Image (cartoon, helix red, strand yellow):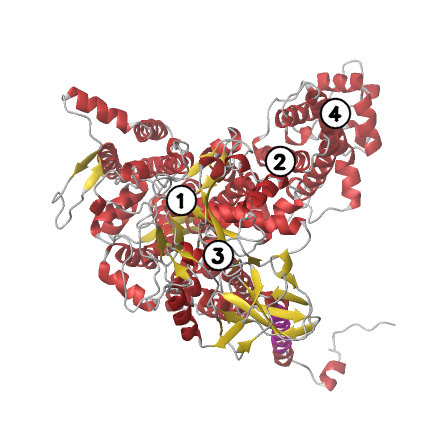
Amino acid sequence: MSAESAPHGRLSSRSRLTQMLRVEPVMGQIGVMGTWRPGIAPERAPAAARRGALGLLFITVSTAVIYVLAHFWAIAFWQASLLGGALGVLAQFAGDERWLFGHAGPDRTTFERNHAVSLAVVGLVWWFVANVLRLFDIEYLISAFVGLAVAAGYGVLSGTEPWYRFTSTVDNVIVRPVGEWSARQRLEPEPSEPPPTPAPVGRLDALPRHLLPSLFLIAATAFAFRETLFFGYRFIGNSDRLNHYISFILYHTHYLEQGHFAAWSGFIFDGFDSLSLPMSFVTPLYAIPALLRTDDVVAVFGIIAPILFAAALIQAYFVAYLLTRDRLASLAGACTYGFATYGLLKIEQSDQTYLSVLTAPAFFYLVHTTIKRNWIKHCVFLTLLIAIHFYFAFLQEFSYNVIFFFVYAAYLLLRRNAYPIIALTLAMIWGALLSAPRLLVQYGTVATSGRGRPQPTIQDVVDLRTLLRYFSRDIFGHSWREAIQVPASWQINLHEGDLVNSSVFGALVFVLVLVSFRWIFRSRTANGVRKYNATVLILYSLVVFAVMHNANAYLLLDRLYQNISFQHSRIGVSALLPVALVTALFLADGRARLQGRARYVAVAASVLLIGVSALDFSAVQNAVLNLLDRPPRLFVTCDNCLPFVNTGPLLLWDVLRLGTLAALFVVLVAAGYFFGRTGRSVMKSVLAVVIVFQAIWGGADYLEGPQTRDYSFPYEANDFVIAASNQFLPPTPAELEQVHGALDNDNYRSVTICPVGLTLENCSTLIGMIWGIRLVDGYSSGVPDRLASLPWPITSTIQSNGHEVRFQSNQLPWSILSFLNTRQGVQVTRQLYMNEDGRVADGLQLVQNPSPYIYPRAYLADNTESVTANGDQAAVRNELSSCPPACDGGLTQRFPIDYVEGPVAGSFDSSGQVTWSGDGDRLTFDFPASPNQRFLVVNERWEPGWSAQIDGQPAPVYATNVLMRGVPVPAGATEVVLTYRSLLYWAWWYTPLVALLGGLLIFLGVRIQRRRVFSRATSARPTRSGSDAARLPESTPTVA
């Protein structure tokens, strides 16, 4: 009997191709195969699921490639689909080899035997059908899925798809080929064969078990970002994301498209180092728009944000499963972690601030699983993660996570495992060495931005009242628009404080665990029941709650941070994972698979509680008030409802929601414990399902609910923003040229006029970075000391504090602005801010500088005086408050003397006109030659990283007039080139060199350790003497 005749035999590529082309015999075989039992054999169901997942892998890879090529590179669909199909085929082949056939790795022979024809035919049929459907203007995603379905069906009919591997057949039967059928087409027993050697079981073999939870979390992410992914909206997020993430990415994209990089930006604060800020350091993600050949960074990073969010959810799921071995409980823990308000706020803020949330599960896994055998490997992984955080993350939040990891490692040390704390400590040291340039820059930024305080201070509200937000984040207002309607003394910052909550039931579960004092949990494993002591997780969470809600604990932490003005309620980020893990452990403890009536009870209870959770309680409130004939009201007070707590105004409908759900929670828990073990299993199953729903439902509303689209001007009430498809588009080169021409941007600076009545958040950083306008004002983590030292008037028209310089009216301090090369103020409008219709230049509203004299961008000084830094500030303050030069609110002339913080004094030749070119890190200034010395003054902010080249020779750059740069020019010189080198410039070679050195030391250490172990094993092995070895026993037979 030929191997080709049996469905279980392996067909050669030629035979498969023959079967594919001859449909009639195949249909005949199908007729005979009708004697088989239909369906998928239970023992083959996992393999069938893997096969289906691999089909999803093909469509995922192919559609992703098509999206990138067709949308961003404008490649024709038939070409994009051809390449996408090819890459999808390769991805499916790799997956087939590992998951379907259990091979250790792909090779040519298995490709020819198992995959060549089937994948090629599926890929070609898919490509043909998808392109035909595109001819009828059917969306490419729908075309791709229909093409995949047709290709899979054709593969089954043609025999190229090995579907028979998963079907349930009559035992020990074969089907003869058509040519060998007898009259009765009888079936014969199949010859017995030796059982196949089972494939080795590895970690990847367990992944299909988690495929459904992973797909569910991906679907939950898609639901949370539904407006962005499916309905054409553009994900903007909060103002920090727009000001310090999107705008910076666009700034760097423009330079990367030109083939170079610029650290220095002249677009805010009279110039600044874009690499020095805590939330805007360049990451590899910044290169994606340039690689995709698009300036639309809003669209690109509107896709990246959900990807990172889904990755965090899946990580949290696997870490929770590591402790619980319960998929449903782990799913609830993952949603508790990923959809916690703080995590949602960080993804709204920027992908870099989200990094601490994204990687916390990976950190915990590495610390938790470190033992003697793997501590070196885990130390290397921890070092890489720590270095990445030091470079790219917001260090304040990461520092809180580090505290938790060290606390957990110390707990493991008490459990007689010292390797986690050793690995973590060494990783912190090596990570700090790898990122020393970035840490030094960060330290310099904090030291010079005015964030230090002489004594500990509390920012925002720290009291027991705010603990109510743990149970319901909407208790003080569902949106900022609602929250700002209460008296100012009761208003709180909805973006700070207790943001650990993700669902009402999840919050109450943690309280239940806390008051039960049962902090040791049991989970099922393959080897029986395993215990996990969660005491350290619970105690650490309590410490975090104390910092967020107790002033003394808060001030103590502030002292540990050297009184730097941080908002330490953000320590809640380090409690997200402990709370989520405790929730998952509680739900998994004692939960058994439900059977029979218990399953129906759980489903009914889950449906009821989900329905109540999804209920619009604002409508319920209105109905109740109408029924009681009471006037409508938004807030209610409950002072002295709780001992020592004055709640202040509370959102009425959310109080109803919280009270209703809390009552249902108590009923569910009481019923669960009343009905014994089965009741507890039902109760925990229902809790897990409802927690998952509440977290996802609330998270979706928080991210892209109606309040994110209800605005006349973005951030007018400080709510998050998603924009329409024609808003926040990147300016075209023609638009930039028009705006720059209207402002004379190359020669003069501007300021933005942005009233708080228009928008609560600062406007300048976005407008400066997006439109490339050279601004004096700005908003960042701190105002530079030199800029803040100028005599800004303390009026309602300007705010000069630790974070921003902002102008709110047309009455501007023109004397200072004239000194800073400012020609006009730009009135912020919706059209300019959102770039809505592409006619921004026509609608610019400018307020011209009335001063008789405006300092030029660069000039040649007449007289200079050498001063200290303090003397420089005092002299400039005196000049700007004296008349002349500062008269009638303006500037009448240039200072008679330029004050230099260096050994430069005397008179210089100031004749001739200065011209300039370049931008970013390199500026060139040209002027006529002179037989006398000159002193060039550049009216842009001085930083130590600036250096000068005069006709190819290095020259010093001195701080001049507090903010400006001064360069002494020798006689006969005609050109000065200023170049900026951030301290991080040296990181490009320093970090790889230190990493190479560390890798070499680890390699040598491992080699030496292995040699020692080998030598000890060799020396301990027993040996025989030469005479004993030569002597044969008497019974040993001899060979003739």
Residue wearing tag 3: 853
Position in image of residue 519 (x %, y %): 30, 54
Q: CA distance from mark 3 to mark 1?
A: 25 Å
Query: Mark 3 or mark 4, which is nearer the start of the sequence?
Result: 4
Residue at 14% across, 21% down: 629
Stretch of the chain drawn in magenta = 993-1012
- Give the amino acid type for the residue marked by disc 1 in the picture: Cys
Q: Quick one: SS at disc 4?
A: helix
Q: CA distance from mark 4 to mark 3?
A: 70 Å
Residue wearing tag 4: 128
Q: Residues within 10 Å of mark 1 (few under 14, many from 20)?
A: many
Q: CA distance from mark 3 to mark 2?
A: 62 Å
Position in image of residue 360 (x %, y %): 45, 54
Residue wearing tag 2: 60
Q: Quick one: SS at disc 2?
A: helix
Look at discs 4 and 1 and give the one toward the viewer: 1
Q: CA distance from mark 2 to mark 4?
A: 18 Å
- Give the amino acid type for the residue marked by disc 3 in the picture: Tyr
In the image shown, does 930 or 948 lie closer to the viewer? 930
In this rendering, position of residue 151 left or right of residue 181: left
Query: Mark 2 or mark 3, which is nearer the start of the sequence?
Result: 2
Residue wearing tag 1: 754
